């Protein structure tokens, strides 16, 4: 019987390109097909979402249902029966019904009272999820409805599929000179390609986007001639190469001083996007975006040039901006001497810790002003200020205008 359910899940997964699981009548996940990985820092929020779905509601007359939650995550479930007995449900999801814009992410954070510092990681995670139009979501639900309603325990057993191969004659003749020239050119291109790749990785490590873009644009034709490692499956071959490049870029960004939380988020996002590609051209576009994002992240978030105490402090501040952090709070949390930390921080960053915290908080608040539903008081609380008057004072000092003036200018 499980073979039949397994085949149903495989059909649903390959048809929809959405993560697919089977939960039995005891709420155990028995089958799991999918690419998407929840970043570890988001597990406390998202890991229990599946358990909250009402899959076998005796009051519901529908075998197939849509499920939505306050995180704007969506699922489709289909109940499977055998002789009137509920066996479990096939669940497709999560997926989105809209683009994960800044406004949408901010709305999710606000509604669910999440830390504003998770914004970038939530955005990265949502970018790994499929986006379905209402039409595609309905078609997928109809497909699942047909599959579960026609389910029979042994309907997929011993299905044999034929295979016919055709040999076609070719009369073209290629001379040995041409073959030798081609081999020499291939070797030369291979060496050049590895040299360019190393230069790209170094550009990412340095966070040098100008150098990276120059290398990408000047060598497009060189990388378009890469032979497939799996000639019988060029798409799989290109995906494997893309996954290897993801690993190399992650290592380069790590050497460039990017924190593991950001590395994990970016790496997971592109692993999923690569696996979901349906053409080699799609993969090329994803790879270029991946190189640029790693490079940009190193430039914006790298802390490579700082001493260990300062690096730890910056990481701590970035991840806890919505908390009541101070020099004493940071030093006690990280087991550092407050006086020594204060001296080092000022020497290496040019700012004292309070100035740095205020600057980061105000810069984070700018993204929240795009959400008209948030009041200035809401925004001040979300970035760690319990006093809106103090928030206004700090904002004006850093931006040269009050929060109300900033909102007015940026909504005109």
Image (cartoon, helix red, strand yellow):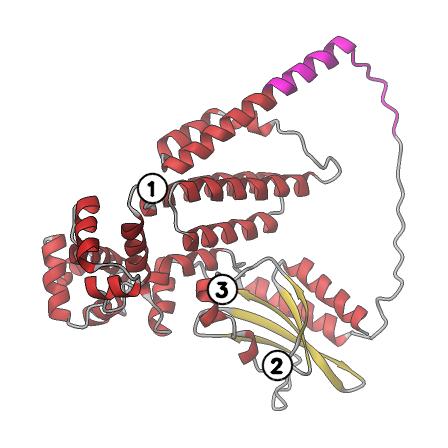
Neighbour tally class for label 3: few under 14, some 14-19, many 20 plus, Cα within 10 Å: some
What is the quadrant of the N terminus in the image?
bottom right
What residue lies at 14% left-to-right and 63% top-to-bottom? 404
Numbered circle sitting on residue 18: none
- Image position of 93 (left or right of 184): left
Q: Earlier in the sequence, mark 3 or mark 1?
A: 3
Q: Which residues are magenta?
A: 168-188
Neighbour tally class for label 1: few under 14, some 14-19, many 20 plus, Cα within 10 Å: many
Residue 380 point in image, percent of width and height: 21, 68
Q: Which residue in the rendered view is the most extreme toward the top?
A: 177
Label 2 and label 3: CA atoms lie apart by 21 Å
Q: Nearer the viewer, mark 2 or mark 1?
A: 1
Residue annotated with mark 1: 299
Q: Earlier in the sequence, mark 2 or mark 3?
A: 2
Residue annotated with mark 3: 97
User: Do the CB atoms of the residues marked 3 and 1 lie less than 8 Å apart?
Assistant: no
Residue 60 point in image, percent of width and height: 61, 87
């Amino acid at each position: 019987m499980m073979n039949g359910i397994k085949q149903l899940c495989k059909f649903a997964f390959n048809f929809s390109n959405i993560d697919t699981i089977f939960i039995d009548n005891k709420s155990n996940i028995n089958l799991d097909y999918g690419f998407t990985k929840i970043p570890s820092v988001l597990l406390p929020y998202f890991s229990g979402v599946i358990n909250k779905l009402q899959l076998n509601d005796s009051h519901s007359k529908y075998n197939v249902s849509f499920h939505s939650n306050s995180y704007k995550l969506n699922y489709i479930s289909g109940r499977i029966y055998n002789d009137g007995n509920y066996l479990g449900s096939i669940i497709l999801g999560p997926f989105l019904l809209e683009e994960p814009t800044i406004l949408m992410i901010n709305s999710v954070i606000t509604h669910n009272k999440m830390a504003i510092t998770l914004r970038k990681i939530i955005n990265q995670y949502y970018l790994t999820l499929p986006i379905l139009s209402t039409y595609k979501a309905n078609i997928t639900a109809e497909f699942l409805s047909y599959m579960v309603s026609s389910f029979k325990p042994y309907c997929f057993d011993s299905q044999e599929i034929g295979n016919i191969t055709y040999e076609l004659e070719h009369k073209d003749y290629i001379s040995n000179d041409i073959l030798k020239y081609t081999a020499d050119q291939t070797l030369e291109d291979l060496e050049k390609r590895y040299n360019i790749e190393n230069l790209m990785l170094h550009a990412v490590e340095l966070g040098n986007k100008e150098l990276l873009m120059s290398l990408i644009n000047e060598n497009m034709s060189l990388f378009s001639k890469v032979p497939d490692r799996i000639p019988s499956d060029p798409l799989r071959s290109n995906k494997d190469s893309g996954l290897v490049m993801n690993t190399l870029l992650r290592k380069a960004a790590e050497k460039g001083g990017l924190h593991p939380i950001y590395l994990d988020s970016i790496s997971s996002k592109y692993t999923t996007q690569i696996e979901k590609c349906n053409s080699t051209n799609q993969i090329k576009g994803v790879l270029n975006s991946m190189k640029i994002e790693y490079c940009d992240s190193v430039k914006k978030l790298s802390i490579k040039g700082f001493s260990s105490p300062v690096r730890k402090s910056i990481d701590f501040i970035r991840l806890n901006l919505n908390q009541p952090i101070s020099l004493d709070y940071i030093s006690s949390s990280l087991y550092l001497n407050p006086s020594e930390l204060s001296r080092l921080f000022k020497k290496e960053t040019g700012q004292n810790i309070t100035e740095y915290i205020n600057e980061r908080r105000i810069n984070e608040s700018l993204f929240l002003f795009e959400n008209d539903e948030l009041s200035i008081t809401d925004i001040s609380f979300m970035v760690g200020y319990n006093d809106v008057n103090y928030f206004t004072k700090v904002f004006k000092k850093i931006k040269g205008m009050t929060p109300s003036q900033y909102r007015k200018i940026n909504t005109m």
